[in-house]
């Protein structure tokens, strides 16, 4: 059973930092790319960052480049999102995403989400 469990969200002032974590289980974490998405109220879910299975390659959405860093610890089956210089526009529910093989095809899995609120 695939599980993705996010943690680390909360309320932070503009300019502050948060570190999100996503603990994965039920699949071979070290052979799968991992992603973070976010969804703000009234908006569609959007990709924030992606990290390759070995952690050597990362991709970021333009709004977060230079402020957010995605990383992973394959020994702990955990992916992280370090968020610095947070802005009110970063307020959203943040989701962890994986698409591992289940049998002969890949399936989409999402965590339950963690709320990030940036406000003074």
Image (cartoon, grey):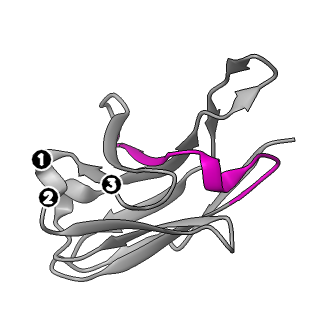
Identity of the residue furthest to the top in this view: 104
Label 1 crowd bin: few (<14), some (14–19), many (20+), radius 10 Å: few
Find residue 34 and report its horizontal and vertical position in percent: 50, 48
* Identity of the residue drawn at 16% across and 76% down: 85
Q: CA distance from mark 2 to mark 3?
A: 14 Å
**Is 24 drawn above or below residue 97 in the view shown?**
below
- Please tell me which of labels 2 and 3 falls first in the chain: 3
Q: Check whether the beta carbons of the residues at disc 2 and disc 3 lie within 8 A of each other.
A: no
Q: Where, quadrant-wise, is the C terminus in this rendering?
A: bottom left
Q: Which residue is mark 3?
A: 57
Find residue 5 and report its horizontal and vertical position in percent: 68, 58
* Identity of the residue drawn at 67% across and 53% down: 29
The magenta stretch spans which residues? 24-41
Q: Is residue 119 left or right of residue 11?
A: left
Find residue 65 and report its horizontal and vertical position in percent: 14, 58
Q: Is residue 52 left or right of residue 28?
A: left
Magenta stretch: includes residue 37: yes
Q: Is residue 113 left or right of residue 116?
A: right
Q: Check whether the beta carbons of the residues at disc 1 and disc 2 lie within 8 A of each other.
A: yes
Label 1's element? helix
Q: Which residue is mark 1?
A: 62
Q: Nearer the viewer, mark 3 or mark 1?
A: 3
Q: Which residue is mark 2?
A: 65
Label 3's element? loop
Q: CA distance from mark 3 to mark 1?
A: 16 Å
Q: Where, quadrant-wise, is the N terminus in this rendering?
A: top right
* Identity of the residue drawn at 24% across and 57% down: 90
């Amino acid at each position: 059973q695939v599980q993705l469990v996010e943690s680390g969200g909360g309320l932070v002032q503009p300019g502050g930092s948060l570190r999100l974590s996503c603990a994965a289980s039920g699949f071979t974490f070290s052979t799968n790319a991992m992603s973070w998405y976010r969804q703000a109220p009234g908006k569609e879910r959007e990709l924030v960052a992606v990290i390759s299975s070995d952690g050597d390659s990362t991709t970021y959405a333009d709004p977060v480049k230079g402020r957010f860093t995605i990383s992973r610890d394959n020994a702990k089956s955990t992916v992280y999102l370090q968020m610095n210089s947070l802005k009110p526009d970063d307020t959203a529910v943040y989701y962890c995403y994986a698409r591992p093989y289940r049998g002969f095809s890949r399936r989409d899995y999402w965590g339950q989400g963690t709320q990030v609120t940036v406000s003074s």
